[in-house]
């Protein structure tokens, strides 16, 4: 099997310098690779898949057990084999996160805001769960008990309120900025409520880490399927980590030198450059109760504006 030495060295250096949490990496792989192919795989084949990412069988089994207790994964025993899938809760969490990864959700901003006012009727557990879910969706705490976002998705917000059992315990309002949409007081509020400087630094570090591997993949035909899988897994895992901290604010509220758009473009290009090899590797390793993985669902090819669909249409038929 062909391999690119530079890519192997990059993967090894990345894993050594930036150790990944097994639980989080497993969710990344389930969301990015497995969900489009039906969502269920035999644990033994999953262990073989992630070995190249430095996860040994004991780590995987321990992490899968924890993720099951945390309601991310659910198992089914068939004979002597265990098959794991995303739970409904895990899939909902995944969909919230990955909607922001594969497609930039930002639209032209009219000045509208969504406000969630948490009153005294919430239990401590409900309050904590609501804050955590809304933070993932990009909401900021603008005052005690008041969370806001200037361009939140209404359906996602309702889904969060239903999922946390708080839909009948909070007040949801829509407000509008009066005057200039990018006034100095508004920019100061954004700076105070969202950690944009830290997110900017994270995006720049992401670009620094992945630009070399994009150049290497783009300039070489000697990148093997397993390497493509490892690069794509680490790419999405790292982009997801940064993006989940990004509140996805309208461009009018962002600094002029915001690096998030450049990071998204790099991610799309490297994803496109590695996805065929990565898919070949995953299809050859992972197993379901019925044998090989089924083909990817149509929505898979709409990622990053449909660049994968274009490649699929251009691929020669066998």
Image: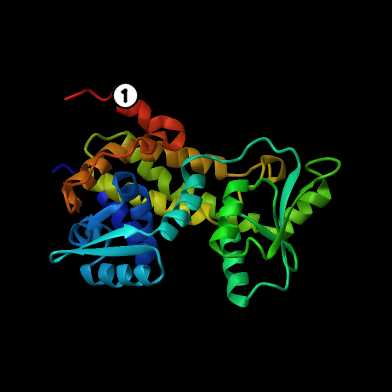
Q: Between 27 and 114, which is closer to the camera in this rendering?
A: 114
Give the total number of marks visible in the rendering.
1
- Colour mapping used in the image: rainbow
At 54% from the left and 40% from the top, the residue drawn is 104
Left/right placement of residue 264 relative to residue 210 reads right
Outermost residue on the bottom side: it is 124
Left/right placement of residue 18 relative to residue 65 reads right
x then y, percent, for residue 173: 75, 53
x then y, percent, for residue 111: 76, 42
The image quadrant that residue 44 belongs to is bottom left
If the image is split into quadrants, where does the N terminus sit?
top left
At 27% from the left and 37% from the top, the residue drawn is 276
x then y, percent, for residue 101: 48, 46
Can you say whether 286 is above or below 2 in the image? below
Can you say whether 68 is above or below 201 in the image? below
Q: Is residue 200 visible?
A: no
The image quadrant that residue 216 belongs to is top left
Q: Residues within 10 Å of mark 1 (few under 14, many from 20)?
A: few
The image quadrant that residue 70 belongs to is bottom left
At 22% from the left and 61% from the top, the residue drawn is 43
Q: Between 23 and 1, which is closer to the camera in this rendering?
A: 23
Q: Is residue 162 visible?
A: yes
If the image is split into quadrants, where does the C terminus sit?
top left
Q: Secondary structure at mark 1?
A: helix
x then y, percent, for residue 109: 70, 38
Can you say whether 26 is above or below 263 in the image? below
Location of mark 1 (residue)? 313
């Amino acid at each position: 099997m062909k391999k690119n030495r530079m890519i192997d060295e990059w993967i090894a250096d990345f894993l050594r310098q930036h150790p990944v949490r097994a639980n989080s990496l497993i969710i990344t792989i389930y969301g990015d690779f497995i969900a489009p192919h039906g969502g269920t795989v035999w644990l033994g084949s999953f262990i073989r898949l992630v070995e190249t990412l430095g996860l040994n069988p004991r780590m995987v089994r321990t992490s899968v057990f924890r993720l099951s207790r945390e309601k991310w994964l659910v198992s089914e025993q068939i004979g002597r084999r265990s098959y794991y899938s995303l739970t409904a809760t895990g899939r909902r969490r995944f969909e919230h996160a990955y909607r922001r990864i594969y497609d930039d959700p930002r639209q032209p901003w009219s000045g509208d805001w969504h406000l969630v006012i948490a009153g005294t009727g919430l239990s401590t557990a409900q309050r904590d769960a609501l804050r955590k879910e809304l933070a993932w969706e990009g909401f900021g705490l603008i005052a005690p008990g008041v969370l806001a976002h200037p361009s939140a998705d209404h359906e996602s917000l309702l889904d969060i309120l239903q999922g946390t059992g708080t839909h009948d315990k909070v007040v949801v309002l829509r407000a509008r900025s009066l005057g200039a949409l990018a006034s100095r007081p508004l920019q100061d509020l954004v700076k105070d409520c969202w950690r944009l400087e830290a997110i900017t630094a994270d995006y720049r570090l992401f670009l620094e880490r992945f630009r070399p591997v994009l150049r290497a993949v783009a300039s070489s035909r000697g990148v093997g399927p397993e390497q493509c899988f490892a690069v794509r897994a680490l790419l999405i895992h790292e982009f997801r980590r940064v993006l989940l901290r990004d509140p996805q604010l309208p461009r009018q509220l962002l600094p002029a030198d915001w690096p998030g758009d450049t990071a998204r473009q790099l991610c799309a290009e490297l994803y496109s450059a590695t996805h065929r090899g990565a898919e070949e590797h995953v299809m050859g390793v992972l197993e379901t109760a019925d044998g090989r993985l089924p083909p990817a669902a149509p929505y898979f090819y709409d990622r990053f504006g449909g660049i994968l669909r274009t490649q699929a249409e251009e691929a020669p038929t066998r």
